[in-house]
Amino acid sequence: MKSLVFIFTLFFAQVSFASKCEVNEDTILNNESFTNIFVGIVTKAYVEDFSELRGGKRAVAEFDLVETIKGKPEKLKFVYFVNDGHSIMLGQKHLFVTDDKGFSHYCSGSGVINYWAVSSTSVRSHIYYRLKDKVVQ
């Protein structure tokens, strides 16, 4: 019985931790560190050494800019991902939410949009359209 209680406690602790990352158009727009919001098509992606990170690696995505929602993403050459919470798909449109250096935080909402084979893209696509509506107003 003690084992069962421990498993449930561990499960709910993980669910609670994961749920602290609430992403929607308001959390994106209200976060001052997210200076660039844009859509791009990933043309190249790779992993490189990054000594400032505990794991020593970061993912890098090169992109063709499709649409600017906020900021000056044309000044960026790369988008950097420093955790494993992002999917990068070559040749697909991505919503990128980054700081001024191109780093995408795991709670930023960055990721592939309008791709039928990934269920999370419908939520991200919804956020994309709501962001466009709020920024244009």
Image (cartoon, rainbow, N blue to C red):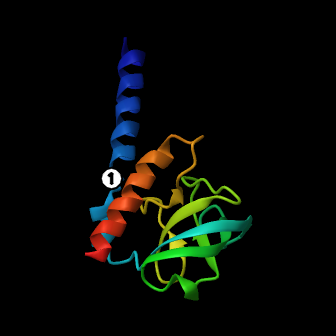
Residue 120: percent from the left, percent from the top? Answer: 48, 44
Numbered disc 1: secondary structure: loop
Q: Position of residue 49 (x, y in %)?
A: 72, 70
Residue underneath mark 1: 22
100 shown above or below 23: below
Instruction: Describe residue 66's horizontal placement relative to residue 123 as left or right.
Output: right
1 vs 41: above or below: above
Q: Where is the N terminus found, in terms of image quarters?
A: top left
Task: From this view, report whether residue 62 is shown above or below residue 119.
Answer: below
Q: Is residue 7 left or right of residue 27?
A: right
Tell me if 93 is positioned left or right of 17 in this view.
right
| Quarter of the figure with residue 130 | bottom left
Given residues 74 and 4, the one toward you in this image is: 74
Q: Amino acid at mark 1?
A: Glu
Q: Residue at x 34, y 66 (%)?
A: 131
Residue 121, image x and y in percent? 50, 48
